[in-house]
Image (cartoon, grey):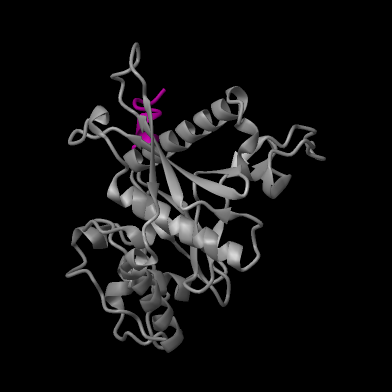
Amino acid sequence: MPDNLFADTLNQTTVNRHRLGKYTKDNYSIHVSDLMQSSKERIFCAREHAINFHENRGGELIKKLTPAMSLLYSMGNAVQDHLTAKFIQHNEYGHTLWGDWSCGCKKTKIRYSLKPNGRCNHCAGPIDRYCEVDLRQPKYNLVGHPDLLVLWPPYLHIFEVKSIDRQDLPFDDIKEPLGDHTLQGTFYYWMLLDMYMRGEIPYKPHDVVRYLYVDRSNKKLFFGEPYKEFQKRRSDAARLKPMLDRATTMMQSLSGRTLPPRICSDVLCTRAKGCTVQTSCFNRKSNILDSQNDRSRLRPKSPR
């Protein structure tokens, strides 16, 4: 048996379907979490998204995932599944969870609902698995996925789940939700309100967003409480303007068939190394989106 049989496989960088989902021939979507990115390594690049849409219509946008990032996402999903199941089973208000529901085989899915009582026609299992609701704002081609929605008539209450393990911020020192988290909650509030005003959902969102923090460290294995919950009123819509301006740049680029400026100084900068269209971006001779004359067919090689 070879050495490092599991580790060599798991330590490889992988490519994964991005939360944006599929591009269609005539449309695309930007996820809220992408618009919000501000770090040098992950800052939103309208040029990257424009090239991706131009080259991958009808396909899927992929993202490079380091082994640690893939593990982090899996742990986050496991935490959310765990606490959702606990809430449904052990809380007297577990029946108030509102969203999308699926069965074990995922062939049956019911949207915008409290927990249904039926069973799947394929696997005969209960339709009892909570799924995040897809939020859409067509004006800016935005999508989002709040972690949990609770129906407390006449309002929908937004819950965001955040698992924390940071050296610079001890869990017990957290006294209020962090700024980037409240920004995300604010995005979801305004998107839900927009869907309500358009008649897509029957309930209006409450303007107080709730944030559930989870201590991901092992410091509370034997004592202490690993969960904290905070409430904070959503921000005014003006707070979203800088991010919406980024989305507008993307829309104007595609409508004018001209790529936005490159934000990377060179192909070796940190942001460029994580880019999904690095080769295509830096090999283009023109910023005009013309499938016959540009070099849009060039693609970076998928990592092994």
Q: Residue at x 43, y 69 (%)?
A: 52
Give residue 10's position: percent from left, percent from top: 38, 35
130 over 20 or under it: above or below: above
Q: Is residue 214 magenta?
A: no
Residue 50 is drawn in which quadrant?
bottom left
277 or 192: nearer the viewer: 192
69 in relation to 8, above or below: below
Residue 302 makes an appearance in the image: no
| Total numbered labels placed on residues in the image | 0
- Compared with 249, 6 (above or below) is above
**Left or right side of 21 for 10:** left
Q: Quadrant of the N terminus?
A: top left
Q: Residue 209 vs residue 109: left or right?
A: left
Start-end of magenta stretch: 1-11
Residue 268 in view (yes/no): yes
Q: Where does the image place residue 281, in percent across and percent down from the top left?
A: 31, 73
Question: Measuring 74% from the left and 39% from the top, which residue is drawn there?
Answer: 116
In x, y percent, where is residue 145?
50, 52
227 left or right of 94 in image: left
5 within the magenta span? yes
Principal SS element in the magenta part?
A: loop
Name the residue: 35% across, 34% down. 8
| Rendering coords of residue 151 (x, y %) | 60, 44
Outermost residue on the top side: it is: 222
Quarter-of-image position of residue 134: bottom right
